[in-house]
Amino acid sequence: MTSNEGSIDRIVRILAGLALIGLTLTGNIGVWGWIGVVPLVTGLVGWCPAYRLLGLSTCPMKSKT
């Protein structure tokens, strides 16, 4: 399982996940806010299964020197 998320992508996912979970816990949004667990976990792990299925990657290329 190689990383397929870049640094900015990971940060955005973590922040979005935390925001959704926080809004759910404070009662500002409904139960659907728990979907924030998905971007939070994928951001922490650095691997997104949807990116894998679509053949995408935001991870920068490593030089072959």
Image (cartoon, rainbow, N blue to C red):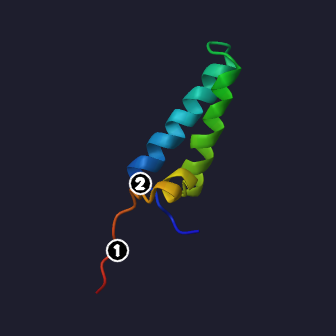
**Residue at the farthest bottom position:** 65
Image quadrant holding the N terminus, namely bottom right
* Left or right of 36, for residue 61: left
Q: Residue at x 53, y 69 (%)?
A: 2
The residue under label 1 is which amino acid type? Answer: Lys
Residue 45, position as x, y percentages in the image: 59, 56
Dot label at residue 62? 1
Crowding at label 2, few (<14), some or many (≥20) Cα neighbours within 10 Å?
few
Mark closest to the chain's N terminus, 2 or 1:
2
Query: In terms of image quadrants, where is residue 35?
Result: top right
Query: Image height check: is 16 above or below 48?
Result: above
The residue under label 2 is which amino acid type? Answer: Ser
Q: Which sits in the foreground, 55 or 63?
A: 55
* Left or right of 13, for residue 20: right
Q: SS class of the residue under badge 1? A: loop
Query: Image height check: is 55 above or below 26?
Result: below
Image quadrant holding the C terminus, namely bottom left
Tag 2 residue: 7
Q: Which sits in the foreground, 30 or 44?
A: 30
Q: Which residue is drawn at 46% across and 45% down?
A: 11
Residue 59, position as x, y percentages in the image: 40, 61
